[in-house]
Image: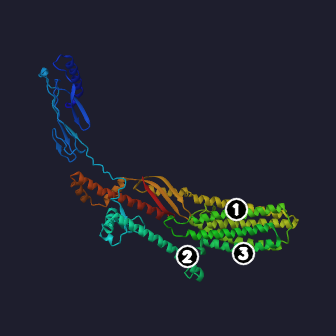
Amino acid sequence: MMPALAAQRRGCRGLYRLYLRCQAAPRPRACHGWQVSMKSGSLSYILPCNRLPVQLMSQVRVYTSNGQKKGLGSEDTNGSARGETVHKVETGQDTANAGQKQSSPKQPIQLKVKAVLKKREYGPKYTQNNFITGVRAINEFCLKSSDLDQLRKIKRRSPHDDTETFTVYLRSDVEAKSLEVWGSPEALARERKRRKEAEIKYRENLFRNQRLLWEYKEFFGNTKPRSSTAAMFFKGPGKVVMVAICINGLNFFFKLLAWVYTGSASMFSEAIHSLADTCNQALLALGISQSARTPDPSHPYGFTNMRYIASLISGVGIFMMGAGLSWYHGIMGLLHPHPVESLLWAYCILAGSLVSEGATLLVAINEIRRSARAKGLSFYQYVVQSRDPSTNVVLLEDAAAVLSVAVAATCMGLTSLTGNPYYDSVGSLGVGTLLGTVSAFLIYTNTEALLGRSIEPEQLQRLTELLESDPVVRAIHDVKATDMGMSKVRFKAEVDFDGRVVTRSYLEKQDIEQLLQEIQQVKTLEELEAFMLKHGENIIDMLGAEVDRLEKDLKQRNPDVRHVDLEIL
């Protein structure tokens, strides 16, 4: 580095003029100008040759990463990035200008070099510090539980709600133990292959045994006690569906007899309508039973959407079977009219259907009112949002059934009074149109539910305010709350945590005096690195604990929230 920093600019201009004067004057041999260089780190400074009548002296002191001073002309022997090579450069004095005074006095310059740790190359696959559970260690590395007793055990924060901590092992220790047990990676690979084949064979035998057990139950009868799935059909939506199946099945049978006796197109439409209702409600019962299945690895969020799927298929069935056949029979009646027989029995059956369908409709209305009151919603909101698809289908089908009975009775009465069979065919078309409207509504609402719609804005605002009011949260972004059906909500947000609050929470649980002593004992870079790694890992664990606490608070204050995904921003 150039000496005499105070007169650097003035000195450079003087040196350049002296250099030009030196070139113009006669001399025995030419001056080569700026020749001598000084390097410090990555900087290079060019100094004039010994022909120039200037003498420059520089002393540079460098502080290395370990805090020791290096004197004049010292050199870093290990070649690392923590030190710099310093050269002492001295220019001679020209004999022609020996009497001139030096422009500035000598001053030492000190340079502090920033110490950084050497970057570690971890490679494309680094698993030295990875943790592994005991179950995975036994299954993936073909070990026994007794083999894990000799390994280092580490207590970690549990990601599950039912346990606070659980034991894990270092993956490197498990890999070393597996090689010690099996001798070589090839032997371990052979054992894994053998166990995989045994597992496949076991699954095949299990499937065969389950099939034999099913055949045994079919032959001798099932003597197991009634499961919780069967108990679902004695309360709530299951009860409504079972009542509707029984009533609509009886209605279909009697309406079919009336159509055979009278030949009325409207009565045929009513029979088809009751048959469609019976089949669709049987499908709803299947959806209710399937939705109660326990989540498995293939379906980690459960099978609650099976109710919406069953309701969607039911809507499609109403449209194709109920509306389609009613329209077809009505059009054929208009194209090929035929006289209608005595309608007395038809009126009696329609009256009985009106009473039975009305009773089912009242059961569905009462169930929806009770559920809507529990959710704090109005009757209309509960139906439109399809909160309970099974009960909605029963409600709409029975409402359509009551209206269709009224339409069929009116058209049959007009046919009896006027003797014109066209009124009866028009009644069949009216019943088909009513069923088509109901099926379109069911298809739309259940499709919206299956697509994953958002929850109500008021509820989303409450969840957002609950997170933002926590001291550890600085801000939240990209908030998504999806209604998974059957009062289950999945909440996701990216959270910007306040690192100061998290660190303070960690320090509040530490002995500050002991921590201060540890800091005072740090003398070298290695000790500093060990200190930072230790407490840095603990602070990260503290951040994970804060995430668990926020998720638990959200679930406790909002029972509808079943799954919470908080991403650290």
- Tag 2's secondary structure? helix
Looking at the rendering, which quadrant does residue 391 occupy?
A: bottom right
Q: Which residue is mark 1?
A: 319
In the image, is residue 117 above or below residue 385? above
Q: What kind of residue is marked 1? A: Phe
Q: Residue, x 80% and y 72% (percent of image)?
A: 260
Q: Residue, x 58% and y 75% (percent of image)?
A: 230
Indicate which label's residue lies in the foreground, 2 or 1.
2
- Tag 1's secondary structure? helix
Q: Residues within 10 Å of mark 2 (few under 14, many from 20)?
A: few
Question: Viewed as shown, does residue 85 lie left or right of 341?
Answer: left
Q: Which residue is mark 2?
A: 211
Q: Position of residue 393 (x, y in %)?
A: 65, 66
Q: Which residue is mark 3?
A: 250
Gap in angstroms between the C-alphas marked 2 and 3: 35 Å
Looking at the rendering, which quadrant does residue 394 occupy?
A: bottom right
Q: What kind of residue is marked 3? A: Leu
